[in-house]
Image: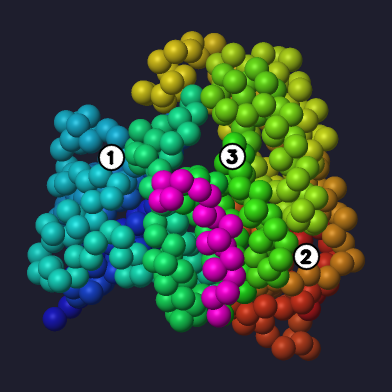
Amino acid sequence: MKQPTIDIVTLGCSKNLVDTERLMFMLEASGYKCEHNPAHPRGETAIINTCGFIGDAKEESINTILAFAQRKTEGKAPKLKRLYVMGCLSERYMKELTAEIKEVDGWFGKFDYTGIAALLPNLKTENLCPAEDSRRRKLTTPRHYAYLKISEGCNRMCSYCAIPLITGRHTSRPMDEIVDEAKWLASKGVKELNVIAQDLSSYGTDLCHRHLLPELVERLAGVEGISWIRLHYAYPTDFPDELLDVMARHSNVCKYLDIALQHCTDNMLGLMRRHITRAEQDSLIRRIRDKVPGICLRTTLMVGHPGETEQDFEELLQWVRRMRFERMGAFAYSEEEGTYAQRHYKDNVPEQVKQERLGRLMEVQQEIAYEMMQAQTGTTAKVIIDSEDSAYYIGRTEYDSPEVDCEVLIKKDPGKPKCRKGEFYNVHITRAEAFDLYATL
């Protein structure tokens, strides 16, 4: 009997991807074949895991749902019979979406994996694992790396952010459970753990009223088989400084920290409700760099938030030039329903000004990134191989997270041994561009 196929599309962040992997395990354990992000969907059932963070993400989610709805309506072979939607967008706008898009057979919240699975024919109920049993995942990433989600939700309530409205209060997973999952991932061949949460800095504070992230990373560093541990989405306010000692002490904890700072002026940090001052934020950056020499700081900044003056923006440009972040992304403010900013501020920065500021900010960062990359020419680096094409093996250093950061392109040489996916190699950097390095073994 032919396996029924389910096409699953994941939109948004790596935290959504982990949710998809849990759902896929349930489905495949019941005899379904799951195709993740298929280029050409062909299954009779489709599930879309949506993102609802900002305007662009919501638009992408809606367009994806409508494309599958159209396929279902047209009825062309292969016919789509069932269409389900889950995730952040569905969690936040379920009532409105249910009324507007009738082709969808079921709308489910961010964490309702079992709700979707229970509607499918021939599902084995014993495979409906609880959401916290996250070891039961079907990994969609390359075998050598995986994402490790340590908490859900956020208590910070920044003015612009809808995440607490979608995910709820910050909830940490038990430490023993996380470490067990890391050991399980290592047993499956995972060498690189990308530790993720909406707010890493708060890990443990809801369990025992103290910061447990340093202790957790210490224990993860002791898991046999894990060569790289990378930390994503720390928050600057109440940052656990003990973490820096752990990072400096363990060679398998990458010198990499993803910490969203958003802005630099006291005016904007106040309006954004970040609960930190410019002086405190700058002091934190200095401590991080002093305690973990050579660290790669990745941050995200926002332009065009209500109340941002031209002076605020010019100060931001100068600050970025001085701080010289190794990795930086930026986005323009978009008003989100239900947030503090939407309820209390007027969106008073014109869209054209937002986009102009965004472009200028990224131009500055591109210059910085280019200079930093050029400085690596002639050096050696340790890389892990993710993939290959006809001319290059494609890898990353410890300073580069999958999908979002720089790549190292290693020229293939018939006279040298082939590189294997998921293995580490030492390379010589021969050339640099703004966001990529070129190298030889």
- Element class at badge 1: helix
Q: How many marks?
A: 3
Q: Earlier in the sequence, mark 2 or mark 1?
A: 1
- The amino acid at mark 1 is Glu
Q: Secondary structure at mark 3?
A: loop
Residue 1 lies, with reference to residue 96, above or below; the image says below
Amino acid at pointer 3: Asp
Query: Badge 3, how many Cα within 10 Å: few under 14, some, many 20+?
Result: few
Labelled pair 2, 1 in contact (Cβ < 8 Å): no
Q: Decide if residue 82 is on the left or right side of residue 277.
A: left
* Picture residue at 23% right of the left edge, 74% below the top: 29
Q: Given the image, on which type of amino acid does mark 2 rest?
A: Tyr
337 in the magenta segment: no
Magenta highlight on residue 213 = yes
Give, as a single range, the part of the protein colored magenta: 206-224
| As drawn, 200 above or below 6 | above
Q: Which residue is mark 3?
A: 238
Which of the 4 image quarters holds residue 4? bottom left
In this picture, residue 31 sits left or right of residue 161: left
* Mark 2 Cα shell of 10 Å, populated few (<14), some (14-19), many (≥20): some
Distance from disc 2 to disc 1, alpha carbons, whole Å, reads: 43 Å
| Residue 45, picture quadrant | bottom left
Q: CA distance from mark 1 to mark 3?
A: 29 Å
Which residue lies at the image location 78% right of the left edge and 74% below the top edge? 427
Q: Which residue is mark 2?
A: 438
Task: Name the disc covering residue 91, or none.
Answer: 1
Residue 74 picture location, percent across and down: 19, 47
Q: Give coordinates of residue 139: x percent, y percent.
A: 40, 69
